[in-house]
Amino acid sequence: MNITPRGCSSIGGELACGMEECRAAALSIFTSYGYNPFNPAEFQLLEGMMKNLHRRRRGRVIALNSPFGEPCCLRADLTLSALSYMALHHTPDEFPLRLCYSERVFASPRPPRENIEDTQVGVELFGWEGVGADVEVLAVLLRALDSLGLSESVVVLGDVSIFPALFADLPGGLAEKLIEKLEDGAYYEYGETLAASDTSEERKKNLGELPWLKGTPEILSGAERIFGSSELFRPLREITASLGALGYSDRLMVDLGFIRDLGYYTGPVFNVYSSDKGVLLGGGGRYAGSLADTRFSCQAIGFGVSLRELALARGTRSNVPRAMIWAGATAPSKTLEYAASLAERGASFEISWNQDDTESKNYAIKRGCALWINIEGDYALALPSGKRIAISETGGVV
Amino acid sequence: MPVVALPTGRVKDACLDIIEGSGMPAKKLRNAGRNLVVDEGDYRYILGKPSDIPTLVSQGLADLALVGNDVTEESGVELVELIDTGRGRCFMAIAGTPAAAERFNGHSGTLTGLRVASKYERIARRTFESWGAHVKILHLNGSVELAPALGLVDCIFDIVQTGGTLKANGLVVLRRTAEVSLRLVANPGALQLRWESLRGAVNAVRKFVIGG
């Protein structure tokens, strides 16, 4: 029987264990920085999503009607859920407000991917305009990645606020065209559009450089020279300097051609990769436009990273219990009492109710357990060697 | 080591000319025989079927690739298009018998209901949808030109190089829809993370293309 549709997956085994470890570790870091857990609704009202999502994401929402007949979509964006919750439950005098989550998001896949769902962990910080909020969110992200052993992960930073400034006063419609080309990753067409435009040769040359300004934060000096402005790149300067002072300088890159959902995002944006040769784990950025139709008038910043990609990047962990407790010759209450004492000590175990001790041992070997415990017999066997250990001599610890 | 994916088949020679002309090593690549992975100088080349190239790049197996924009568009994968090399030029077009031409001369409504054969199912669908026409697309992997003659479809949507195959099958171009050429494309992540190591190859191709 298969009840899982195409594009969805039921995850179990080592990957599920790995994802659970990542979820617990990440949420532990987030909550220690004051981010409050948030459990959003699975459905979102379609009208609000269509109004607030960027055009590139609108076409990917999975729309459906709720049983009450309301036009909805499966949760396509966690940030908007967090925002909506904040607007309904808090007031601006409580700013800054912090939320964290571990939830699924749904979207039509982009080829060659087929998955329509992904579980993400992330945070949202509302109501702080200073660069300190960007640094905090990025530092929390890097701390969480460190705690998962992903100490070679890399953050690539851009800033979408530079585009309206750099493209200001360009002749009719040119700015929109250039932004569209960059959003589509059409660097060649960006250059062609610029070359064919009615603007000065110097400006064409300078703007032509923009997509190619990528690399370590040192490229910001070059950008400042080309565009004659240090103010424009100040947020990125401050963010990279602050994170550098925290010891993350080797894990920061800058990409001035990086543009994501302009209009939705309004300031610094970032992608996070598992390493400099690794996979994309997720990303985030500063936004304000999406707050326009709430009673909040503030900036916010957040990120979401894929739990599955996190777990795969750090390598799957064994989900084999360390011990198999044989309950075949023991009363269930006594077995569970002993199991509780092991659980209190943090041991992982599984109970075998099989009446046949040989079958139980074989099952333990097949499962990969290190120990098979016979409570009634007061001993444990090391597997697969069969070496016998007396439980009473170890104070119940095996 | 930058990894560059290159298509086999019709455009392979054009790709090798670009690689060589850009000053990248290509001696072993020219004599690759049946080898599909060639390490030469500071580069690794991966040779693949044209339609697989976008997947190789998007999955991170290659940083860069030379591939026709018809193939990348059909794949729908997210890549960064860096340079139009101007090589391997052809165009995408709708072709059919001269009798079908009339339907392409009027309102888009006259196109609705057309049966169209193509191996570019995605682009064909998008093209007709952009004109507001609902058509039936029949996916064929090759010899698309045969389909109208056999009465299977009304027209085809395909790339046209010289027009010789169309002529041989009694077909004419009914509407030219897009220009096609070999493009240098990149994996978005590789571009963000490893631009320093890719810059040399990208600039060399750009210089060759402008100079050539």
Image (cartoon, grey):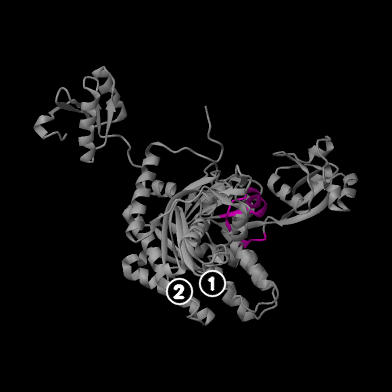
Relative to B56, is A33 on the left or the right?
left
Q: Position of residue B100 (x, y in %)?
A: 88, 45
Magenta segment boundaries in residue numbering: B65-86
How many tags in the picture? Answer: 2
Mark 2 and mark 1 in contact? Answer it, CB < 8 Å: yes
Task: Let me know if residue B17 appears in the view.
Answer: no
Give how far apart the Cα atoms at labels 2 and 1 are: 10 Å
Three-letter amino acid code of the residue under disc 1:
Ser
Q: Position of residue A236 (x, y in %)?
A: 45, 72
- What residue do we see at 66% from left, 49% from top? B74
Return the residue at label 2: A235
Q: Quadrant of the C terminus of chain B?
A: bottom right
Chain letter behind tag 2: A
For label 2, the SS is: helix
Crowd rating for badge 1 (residues with CA inside 10 Å; few <14, some 14–19, many 20+): many
- What residue do we see at 32% from left, 71% from top? A245
Q: Quadrant of residue A129?
A: bottom left
Q: Quadrant of the N terminus of chain B?
A: bottom left
For label 1, the SS is: loop
Furthest residue toward left: A393
Task: Let me know if residue A291 appears in the view.
Answer: yes
Give the mark nearer the N terminus: 2 vs 1: 1
Furthest residue toward bottom: A228
Three-letter amino acid code of the residue under disc 2:
Pro
Q: Is residue A287 magenta?
A: no
Residue A161, label in figure: 1
Q: Is residue B69 magenta?
A: yes
Residue B91 vertical placement versus A137 (above, below): above
Q: Position of residue A252 (x, y in %)?
A: 40, 65
